[in-house]
Image (cartoon, rainbow, N blue to C red):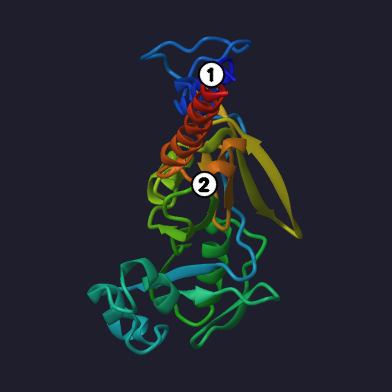
Amino acid sequence: MRNLLPILILVWSLTACISNKRITYLQNLPGNEEIDLDEFIPFAEVEYEYILQPFDVVDIDFASSDEELTKAFEFQGSRMMRQGGGGGGASDIFYFTGYSIDKQGFVELPKLGRIEIAGLSEKEAQKKVQDAINVYFKEDVFVKLRIGGIRFTALGEFNNSGTQIILKNRATIFDALAIAGESNILAMRNKLFIIRQYDGGSKIHQINLHDRALLGSPYYFIQPNDILYLEPMKIRQFGNADNLSSSLGLIISIGSSLILLTALLTRNL
């Protein structure tokens, strides 16, 4: 039993102490070309261009020197909600003031009716709406169309899991991590899964947050409707990051008490 205490201490050391290499972002990993500080890292050769999908929310604005023309293409109160930031908070504003693409890929606009824009890029969809409005008016009425923010879902070892919205037209994986509360100490940062939506289906991609080469990866930028999932380490079964030390400390305390009790009983025999 005397040899049990060093073994317990060794187990404690191996489980309670998590190497910095398992929690540090953007390292130069062995086997990859080393990337020095201040070195320019070009974006991935794959050009980022999001394709609109059913159930996306797009923001469509109309502008003209004649305001009476633009009023005909706006839902009542939508401009007021944009200017006032109303509608359940700034993070939800596009849900209330934007246009939702239906299951068939159409948006329904006042006066213009149903226009199919799913399967198009933002620029292509904007041109299609612009062509539709040019049929009605010879005067200049300009159309601006954009995605109503980048919506993504964070699951697993995040401090703030759930659906989040970034009010930008481009955001990195680290923007998403910051909004999702970053990952806690028990997350497997080398196994971040991205479930990405494509035309007609989904794909699961895996990235390594430890790897500095991520900056040149096609998954460095997130896309609307991405689902991010971080697996926990196996040590997670002992508890979360806050109570892990106390849980293992309790195990060591019980083990030490058993050793002491055994030693006393042995001495009295």
Residue drawn at 72 percent across, 57 percent down: 199
- Rendered position, 114 above or below 31: below
Three-letter amino acid code at disc 2?
Glu
Residue drawn at 57 percent across, 47 percent down: 49
The number of numbered discs placed on residues in the rendered structure image is 2
Q: Position of residue 28 (x, y in %)?
A: 51, 14
Residue drawn at 38 percent across, 57 percent down: 167
The residue most toward the left is 84
Q: Position of residue 149 (x, y in %)?
A: 44, 60
- Between 22 and 162, the residue placed more toward the observer is 22
Tell me which label, 2 or 1, sits earlier in the chain: 1
User: Which numbered disc covers residue 157?
Assistant: 2
Q: Position of residue 208 (x, y in %)?
A: 58, 30
Q: Quadrant of the N terminus?
A: top right
Please tell me how crowded label 2 is: few (under 14), some (14-19), or many (20+) other residues with Cα within 10 Å: many
Please tell me how crowded label 1 is: few (under 14), some (14-19), or many (20+) other residues with Cα within 10 Å: few
- Between 190 and 2, the residue placed more toward the observer is 2
Q: Position of residue 71 (x, y in %)?
A: 34, 85
For mark 1, what is the residue?
10
Whether residue 189 sits left or right of residue 246 in the image: it is right
User: Which numbered disc covers residue 208?
Assistant: none
Q: Is residue 259 in view?
A: yes
Q: Quadrant of the C terminus?
A: top right
Q: Is residue 210 in view?
A: no
| Of marks 2 and 1, the one in the foreground | 1
Asked which secondary structure carries label 1, the reply is helix
Asked which secondary structure carries label 2, the reply is loop
- Between 85 and 101, the residue placed more toward the observer is 85
Residue drawn at 36 percent across, 66 percent down: 91
Query: Label 2, label 1: how many angstroms apart (C-alpha)?
Result: 27 Å
Three-letter amino acid code at disc 1?
Leu
